[in-house]
Amino acid sequence: MNSLQDKARKLRRNQTDAERWLWQQLRAKQLGAKFRRQQSIPPYIVDFVCFEHKLIIEVDGGQHDAQQQYDARRTKFLEQQGYHVVRFWNNDVFENKEGVLQHILTCIREKIPHSNSLSQGEMEA
């Protein structure tokens, strides 16, 4: 077993509350698409991915404020692989659950070309 797979397995066991809640909404094709959680797309591990729609969902906590350059490089790499990356802050997941789910559904149904991030205001608009 390689270390990336080991790390992904460990992340699945230690999900944040926001990731755990969102996984409950995404699992078993509840939104009409199959998602996998803590999936390796070397050299990275993404929170959630739908391979069919090439859609990646990232749920970011406060630590991501300090690693914006890393996240930007990571997102650029994943986009170069053909993925669309959507990021939500933990507080977005908890404070605007319906908006988060609606945005994901829109990405699935309309295959929005690129939506790198979504602020609270954009979800409510």
Image (cartoon, rainbow, N blue to C red):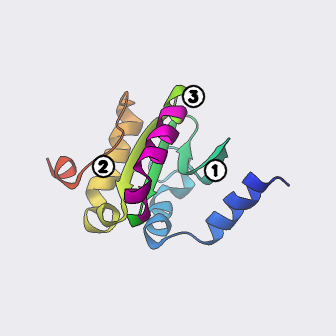
Residue 56 position, x and y percent, is: 49, 43
* Number of numbered labels in the structure image: 3
- Magenta stretch: includes residue 42: no
Q: Is residue 62 left or right of residue 35?
A: left
| Left or right, residue 96 beside residue 21 | left
Dot 3: what SS? loop
- Identify which residue, 4 or 9, lies in the foreground: 4
- Please report the residue visible at 44 percent of the width from the left and 41 percent of the height from the top: 72
Residue 32 visible to the viewer: no
Provide the major secondary structure of the magenta segment: helix
Please give the name of the residue rendered at 53% of the width and 26% of the height, measured from the top-left corner. Answer: 80
Q: Residues within 10 Å of mark 1 (few under 14, many from 20)?
A: many
Residue on which disc 3 sits: 81
Q: Kindly report the distance in space between the C-alpha atoms of the residues bearing marks 2 and 1.
A: 23 Å
Residue range highlighted in magenta: 63-77
Q: Please tell me whether residue 98 is drawn above or below residue 113 in the rendered image.
A: below
Q: Amino acid at mark 1?
A: Gln
> Which residue sits at x=54%, y=33%?
77
Spatial CA distance of label 1 from label 3 is 15 Å
Q: Residue furthest right?
A: 1
- Residue, disc 2: 102
Residue 109 percent location from the top left of the image: 38, 35
* Amino acid carrying mark 2 in the image: Gln
| Residue occupying the point 82% across, 52% down | 2
Separation of disc 2 and disc 3 at Cα?
Answer: 25 Å
In this rendering, the label closer to the viewer, 2 or 3: 3
Question: Residue 39: which disc?
Answer: 1
- 61, 112: nearer the viewer: 61
Q: Residue furthest left?
A: 125
Q: Position of residue 15 (x, y in %)?
A: 55, 69
Work out which quarter of the rendered image holds the N terminus and state it.
bottom right
Give the label, 1 or 3, closer to the camera.
3
